[in-house]
Amino acid sequence: MGYNQKMFGLGSKRSIIREIFEYSKTRATEIGAENVYDFSLGNPSVPAPAEVNDTIRELLATENSVLLHGYTSAQGDANVRKVIADRINEKFGVGISPNLIYMTCGAAASLSICLKAVMEEGAGDECIVFAPFFTEYRVFIENAGGKIIVSNPKEKTFQIDVADFESRITPATKAVIVNSPNNPSGVVYSEETIKALCEVLRRKSAEYGRVIYLIADEPYRELVYADVEVPYLMNYYDNTLVCYSYSKSLSLPGERIGYIAVSPKMEECTNIYLTVCGAGRSLGYVCAPSLFQQVIARCIDAKVNVEAYKENRDLLYDNLTSYGYECVKPDGAFYLFVKALEEDAYKFFERAKAHEILVVPCDDFGVKGYVRIAYCTDKAKVVGALPAFEALAKEYLG
């Protein structure tokens, strides 16, 4: 066969999330979308802030069309990068310059570029991730020539188990990915946890005489409830790269716009940034969408209505726990991590599907026996699903 078998495997078998999402579309044509309780895909249901659409219309009406839709610099428009750097400095005080910002086609591109930049093909490099983790991390890490190493979380809280994490570090460890608020659990890692993790990284980097890079995957940073604070990792560990996306914070997942920020305190930060630029070039990720670079620069302070997600979270958490489900109460993102009512999450998924409830088994997320509910849907869908969740619980619990 004259084609790449590994890529064929990725293309011929979608992720479990996408498989369920495609099934939901088919099922909706059969029985009506209102009768399918699809909680599979993290596709925001809250609309983009009004100023986003207003800005798009204004740009199209007033800007030079050739310039607006033309190429920017490979790393992104200089003014856009300055606006982003200024806002990072205002919020977190890290002293970053626009020349350490690289505009990307969303968080997936950011992660792929960062991993390609720091991991070397054939070197046996390893990247540690914390279960539960976003399933595509495995694809991104392996595509960069690395090996994924999974650190198990603390039971019940799903905070990072720092002792388990330290036991996974070897001289081959090149990078660590931290995703907080977490997909799929909605957990926000505490400052205490982050400080302990970073202390381990500093100690192990010194012991092995090589930098271990910390990659912060932050598409859900703005989606937090109450007064929960999400530690900004550049302020805790110098050798940090931040991968950010506006997919969730501005409800723009299909526009694929985000950035990489390289810490100004990183060892050889200029060279690392140039390596990021080179990795972006090698992967074909140059010149992120021009129109949406300009939109972001003008809507840098816009926010989505997080209260709508909180309302859905509270409805699901309060009712499901009353039915007998065991859930991790999320402090951020828009996912509920629920313990399946039997050991096999896939069997539980099939029984839920018989009630037209579509949830995601989390074995591929690194934790067995749990399912993910993406509650970024309209409230009516959540309310409509509650009797089905109750009936499913009664099948197991009586």
Image (cartoon, grey):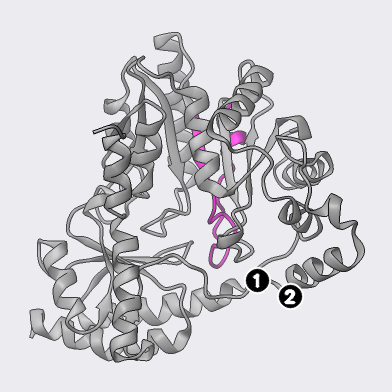
Q: Residues within 10 Å of mark 2 (few under 14, many from 20)?
A: few
Q: Can residue 95 be found in the magenta stretch?
A: no
Is 42 in front, or is 165?
A: 42
Question: Residue 223: x percent and y percent?
Answer: 55, 62
Q: Secondary structure at mark 1?
A: loop
Main SS class of the magenta portion in the image: loop
* Residue under the image location 66 percent in, 22 percent down: 274
Mark seen at residue 244: none
* Residue under the image location 29 percent in, 32 percent down: 2
Q: Are the residues tagged 2 and 1 within 8 Å (C-beta)? A: yes
Amino acid type, residue under disc 2 in the picture: Ala
Amino acid type, residue under disc 1 in the picture: Ala
Looking at the picture, does residue 58 appear above or below residue 194? below
- Figure quadrant of the C terminus: bottom left
Q: Residues within 10 Å of mark 1 (few under 14, many from 20)?
A: some
Q: CA distance from mark 2 to mark 1?
A: 6 Å
* Residue under the image location 32 percent in, 17 percent down: 124
Question: Residue 57: x percent and y percent?
Answer: 81, 71
Q: Which residue is at the far top?
A: 209
Q: Can residue 227 be found in the magenta stretch?
A: yes
Which segment did they paint magenta?
Answer: 214-238
Q: Is 23 displayed left or right of 302 in the figure?
A: left
Looking at the picture, does residue 144 appear above or below residue 189? above
Mark seen at residue 48: 1
Mark 2, residue position: 50
Question: Residue 261: x percent and y percent?
Answer: 64, 36
